[in-house]
Image (spheres, helix red, strand yellow):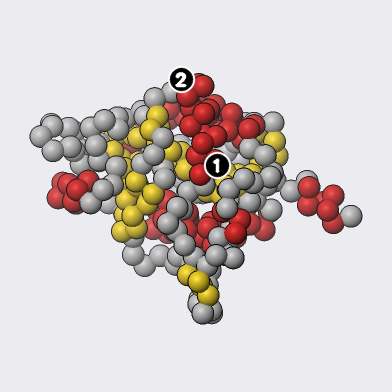
Amino acid sequence: MPARRSAEKPYIGIIGGTGMYRIDDGESERGMQIGKFGGKRVAFLPRHGVGHSIPPHMIGYKENIQKLDDAGVSRLISTTAVGSLREDYRPGDLVITDQFINMTHGRDDTFFHDKVVHVSTAYPYCSELREVAADSAKALGYRFHESGTVVVVNGPRFSTRAESKFFGSMGADIINMTQYPEVALAREKGMCYLNISVITDYDSGIDGKEIDQVSYEEVNRVFEANMEKVRTLLSDIVSKIGNERKCDCGSSLDMAVKG
Ligand SMILES: [Zn+2]
């Protein structure tokens, strides 16, 4: 009866970022939680550990993706807190990320160390799930952006003004410390990856505007104020995601260049 057993596996996974540490009010556990959310069985992982104890550069990105893969997850949703690099991407807005620029260093970002595999990341975020997310956000009446390029920096410090200006000029809309290598690793596993970002601040400022420097307390305050919104949105998205995929994320490895 292997088919029957695998049907019970959660095919949807959620990686919760800053401000999201569990999917229900049940007891908090270390590691992965499998529970009901949006009417489905979902595997949930708090990216920073329970109680937000792991900093961005120390997160076990590979371990997290492997754990979700082992659990049977093929469609992964992540939430992140981000800073905005543009005035029209305002604190409190949601962003359905569609591109990344990696500026992190020293992170293990591939499962392929013993053979040559070049996975395409031209379109790293699942187009099908992004559409579902946009429809849900629209129906719920939230302020959101259908696309956005995130620059991922190593952290844990926040940017200088010069860096912030530079990131904006190279085409990034938002800035974060955790989406890379998570998104790339998920792609190596042939998973769909959807990211919902919550803008908490204007990073180190927008040119020509007097904006207070970002603080960790402020990031948490705005994120927590928006958590209910994110949970409602995630729950709606999960309820609409089927097991059958219309996207090509699952064949990312078939199309990879292998040596
Ligand atoms: Zn997909």
SS for callout 1: helix
Q: Residue 108 appears at what percent x and percent y? A: 44, 67
Residue type for callout 2 = Gly
Q: The N terminus appears in which quarter of the rendering?
A: bottom right
Callout 1 environment at 10 Å: few (<14), some (14 to 19), or many (20+)?
A: some
Instruction: Identify the residue at horizontal 39%, vertical 39% (top origin).
Output: 147
Q: Nearer the viewer, residue 104 or 236?
A: 236
Q: Residue 71 appears at what percent x and percent y? A: 68, 54
Q: Is residue 50 visible?
A: no
Q: Nearer the viewer, residue 155 or 9?
A: 9
Callout 2 environment at 10 Å: few (<14), some (14 to 19), or many (20+)?
A: few
Quarter of the image holding residue 38?
top right
Instruction: Identify the residue at horizontal 63%, vertical 51% (top origin).
Output: 74
Quarter of the image holding residue 122?
bottom left
Which circle marks residue 181 in the picture?
Answer: none
Name the mark nearer the viewer: 2 or 1. Answer: 1
Q: Residue 33 appears at what percent x and percent y? A: 64, 45
Vertical arrangement, residue 248 with respect to residue 239, above or below: below
Q: Is mark 1 within 8 Å of ligand 1?
A: yes
Q: CA distance from mark 2 to mark 1?
A: 20 Å
Q: Residue 121 appears at what percent x and percent y? A: 45, 58
Q: Is mark 2 within 8 Å of ligand 1?
A: no
Mark closest to the chain's N terminus, 2 or 1: 1
Marks counted in the figure total 2
Which circle marks residue 128 in the picture?
Answer: 1
Which circle marks residue 141 in the picture?
Answer: 2
Q: Nearer the viewer, residue 194 or 32?
A: 194
Residue type for callout 1 = Glu
- On the picture, is 105 further left or further right than 250? left
Q: Is residue 42 visible?
A: yes
Vertical arrangement, residue 112 with respect to residue 200, above or below: below
SS for callout 2: loop
